[in-house]
Amino acid sequence: MESYHEDWTDSQRALYDECYRAGADWADDPDTPSEDVQHVINMAEADDDTLADAEIDFPPLIDAVTQATGELFTTVPASHDDPAFKGFVDGVRDSTSDEVFGL
């Protein structure tokens, strides 16, 4: 489910959408390890205080942002205010069935 921040620009919403789709596709890929999916779900469920403004270098997330923007990234802010991070983790969480990870 799309979950935009109301103050995001159209380009931030588009980045969210692209990363959301990439996260959902990645989670649905049968070759994606379940431990990696669980790791992303844990990040999705964490609050920003727990994430502590860290920078994430998780390869599937970096690939999603790079593909969505056409720019090379090495890290992404671990914040639910960041449209790339939020889009990717929302896409993973929403595409994973509740009974698989007890969501």
Image (cartoon, rainbow, N blue to C red):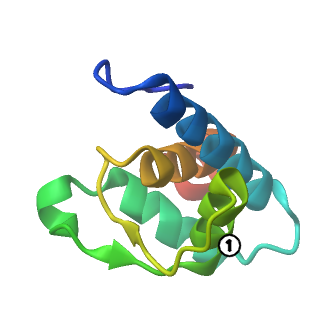
Q: What's the residue at 51%, 81% (across, down)?
A: 74
Instruction: Say above or below: 35 vs 44.
Output: below
Instruction: Say above or below: 5 vs 20.
Output: above
Residue 93 image position (x, y, % from top left): 56, 47
Q: Tell me which corner region of the image, top left, top right, bottom left or bottom right, holds residue 51.
A: bottom left
Number of marks in the rendered image: 1
Residue 25 image position (x, y, % from top left): 79, 52
Q: What's the residue at 49%, 72% (across, down)?
A: 39
Decide which of 78, 67 is in the foreground and name it. 67
Residue that carries the numbered disc 1 in the rendered image: 34
Decide which of 26, 9 is in the foreground and name it. 9
Residue 18 image position (x, y, % from top left): 67, 42
Residue farthest left in this picture: 49
In the image, is 21 to the left or to the right of 28? Answer: left
Q: Residues within 10 Å of mark 1 (few under 14, many from 20)?
A: few
Q: Amino acid at mark 1?
A: Ser
Residue farthest right in this picture: 30
Residue farthest top in this picture: 6
Decide which of 10, 4 is in the foreground and name it. 10
Q: What's the residue at 36%, 27% (across, down)?
A: 8
SS of the residue at dot 1?
A: helix
In the image, is 50 to the left or to the right of 99? Answer: left
Decide which of 99, 13 is in the foreground and name it. 13
Q: Mark yes or no: residue 97 visible.
A: no
- Quadrant in which the N terminus is drawn: top right
Q: What's the residue at 34%, 52% (across, down)?
A: 45
Q: Mark yes or no: residue 41 visible.
A: yes
Residue 28 image position (x, y, % from top left): 80, 54
